[in-house]
Image (cartoon, rainbow, N blue to C red):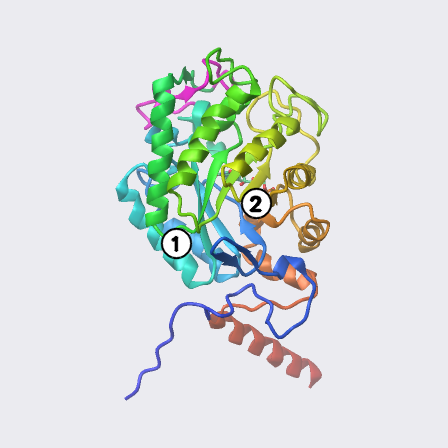
Amino acid sequence: MSTIQIIAGSNAKAPAGTISASIEHNVKLFQPITQKSITTHNRVVVSPMCMYSAENGSLTDFHLAHYGAWAIRGAGIIIIEATAVVPEGRISPGDSGLWSDEHIEPVRRIATFLKSQGAVPAIQIAHSGRKGSTAPPFLGNYTVSEEDGGWPDNVYGPSAIKFADHFPQPIPLTVEGIKHSVKTWVDAAIRADKAGIEILEIHASHGYLLHNFLSGNSNKRTDNYGGSLENRMRFPLEVVSAVRAVWPEHKPLWVRISASDFANPEVMGEDKQGWDIYQSIVFSKELKKLGVDVIDVSSGGNISYAKYPPPSMFQVPFSEAIRTKVGIPTASVGNIRTGKDAESILKEEKADYIVIGREYLRRVAWVNDAATELGVEVSLPKQYGWAIHRGRRTNKTKTEE
Ligand SMILES: Cc1cc2nc3c(=O)[nH]c(=O)nc-3n(C[C@H](O)[C@H](O)[C@H](O)COP(=O)(O)O)c2cc1C
């Protein structure tokens, strides 16, 4: 008796979320894009989003199902959530980590599955800085005590300035501590490579350690790591340079930045001593020189008294400014909800990649919905496609009858 074996993986030639090569179209969202050795079948990126569900830093079955669902439904790149380079670099106890070799296998399992579906596995490596040892947002961001698995006496930043009253008191990193930290980022990058990750993103945004150093609002140091912009950029650039040296040349390196602290109510306003778009452009130029391939442009998160613009796609102008003034590919994120919005950002050359966060939590089949909205059809995973199309035909026949 012969057995028919169904391989649980999409057709490598046409992953879900692809427009058939035989169809002519000018929809940019579904044009493949190549960087270094990595080709992505569309421009859709799932934003890194902490799930607060790791066990001692290890990703679990939950994460396999969570990330796997997006890969099955055709996302081009999936960035695994902020993954701490040291245990005290987690935001919350349930954060993911790459500080130990034990973490490699759980990441490899997910990376392998994402690749089997034609998606590009990426991961964001991170250090929480002065926002460490806090509870997940759905529990209220309070400081987690040692008894509850926190590390409130082991929270670091550039200066002894709390993010907010109810946050832990950060200890200023010594120069020795800075040098050691650089090594921990490097070790995490090496582990990410061993796990089969194809794009590495360094988290330098949202008020975490590297952003704390960049901004004069959180960095009041008087040594070589504080004061002038050159000094404030020094530690983040040391991290990026050391990571680039070990991250394989053929694999892209992304850096996520916050383009402004929003200490100033004007969206594009200046905050010379703090952190603003003008300094972000200078920083991005330095990142480009170090061989960074994409700037993932976010904003905010560094000061509790920030004055944010209304929740529209207010980060897109930052992406456009960096892309134009620095001449580097950008990824744009923030309140991008529809396929039409995504397409217009790409067509107007304001970004090269579209990064979707919460809308992906709401609609797991975002890629398919966006394609429908843009009037094109993308491939579905073969395990679903035949059934859905058959269902459509059946309905049609019944209606016609
Ligand atoms: C549940 C949740 C977790 C998040 N975790 C991260 C993270 O790990 N790293 C990061 O850079 N941003 C994180 N963010 C921010 C998102 O990546 C994204 O930048 C933000 O939600 C804005 O995009 P959106 O409007 O498409 O959601 C998180 C957001 C949410 C909602």
Tell me if mark 2 has few (under 14), some (14-19) or many (20+) residues whose alpha carbon lies within 10 angstroms of its own. Answer: some
Q: Residue at x 61, y 49 (%)?
A: 354
Of marks 1 and 2, which one's residue comes earlier in the chain?
1
- On residue 111, the disc is 1
Q: Amino acid at mark 1?
A: Ala
- Which image quarter holds the N terminus? bottom left
- Location of residue 390 (image quadrant): bottom right
**Residue at (50, 41) in percent of width and height:** 291
x 45%, y 18%: residue? 158
The residue wearing badge 2 is 358
The CA span between labels 1 and 2 is 22 Å
Q: Provide the secondary structure element on which disc 2 rests.
A: helix
Q: Is residue 327 left or right of residue 235?
A: right
- Specify whether residue 154 is painted magenta: yes
Q: Position of residue 336 (x, y in %)?
A: 65, 46
* Residue that extends furthest to the bottom in the rendered view of this protein: 1
Q: Give the x, y percent position of residue 17.
A: 56, 63
Residue 362 placement (x, y as % from top left)? 57, 50
**Residue at image point 50% right, 68% down:** 381
With 14 as the anchor, is 400 left or right in this view? right
Which region is colored magenta? Answer: 140-166
Q: Are marks 1 and 2 in contact (CB under 8 Å)?
A: no
